Structure formats: C-alpha cells, structure tokens
Image (tube, rainbow, N blue to C red):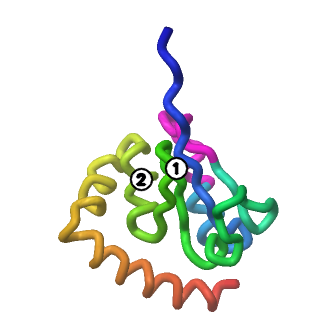
Amino acid sequence: MATEPAPVTIFYDGGCPVCSREIAFYRDRQGTEGLAWVDVSREAPPAGVDRAAALARFHARLPDGRLVAGAAAFAEVWRRVPGFRWLGALVAWRPVTPLADLAYAGFLRLRRLWR
C-alpha cells in the first residue's frame, strides 16, 4: 500500500496584499495538492516556527522537517507547481540561490511600502 508523501507546509503573510495574491495563484493551480498553506497573519504556526520570522520572510517546512526560508522556500514551491518546475530547479541550483535571495531581499524592502 503506497503512502502519500508528506506535504510541504508553506508559511506566508496573508496580510501582505502581494503575498496573498501570489499564494492564491499557486493554490488555484492543479498539481499543488502536496502543498499545505498556513497564513501566519491569521493562525499561529506550529512549534518550531517563529511567527515573527514567518511574517517577515517566506518559509517552508519540508517533509523531512527542515525549515527553509527566502529563495530556498520559493524554490520548494515552484518545484511542485506545474509550469514553474524549471524555475524551482534554477533557483535551487547553488550558484543561483544567493542571487535569488538578494532579489527577494529587495522585494522585502518594497513590501513594507504596500502594508
């Protein structure tokens, strides 16, 4: 009997209009059933996930229990979303991840203006 793989749990700030629109886009796509979504602006994250950190930066808990943030978390989402898998693989590639994190840090600065 095959067991379902553990979901990747995504922790995001639903109070951010840009973030909530992006998450809604991913949630509406077929093939994302293995992603569990937690809006930390509305519900407390589980033990081991700092709420303030999860509100400040995109996080994902992997099936093995590891917590990743920033570009690594986006890569985990994109690797599971049909049509974005190539982007997830690219961002997960070690030479690209630091550059993607720099771009995400720039977005985080702008995000404060939209709140």
Q: Is residue 89 left or right of residue 58?
A: left
Percent from the top left, x then y, of residue 87?
Answer: 30, 56
Residue 97 falls inside the magenta stretch = no
Query: Which residue is painted at 71% across and 56% down in the image?
Result: 46
Q: Residue 103: which disc?
A: none
Q: Residue at x 53, y 88 (%)?
A: 110
Pick whichever, 46 or 84, lies toward us: 46
Q: Residue at x 47, y 45 (%)?
A: 64
Q: Nearer the viewer, mark 2 or mark 1?
A: 1
Q: Amino acid at mark 2?
A: Glu
Quadrant showing the C terminus: bottom right
Whether 60 is drawn above or below 27: the answer is below
Secondary-structure class at tag 2: helix
- In the image, 13 versus 50, the foreground residue is 50
Q: Which residue is mark 1?
A: 65
x and y, in percent, of residue 67 in the image: 51, 60
Q: Is residue 84 left or right of residue 38?
A: left
Kind of residue at disc 1: Gly
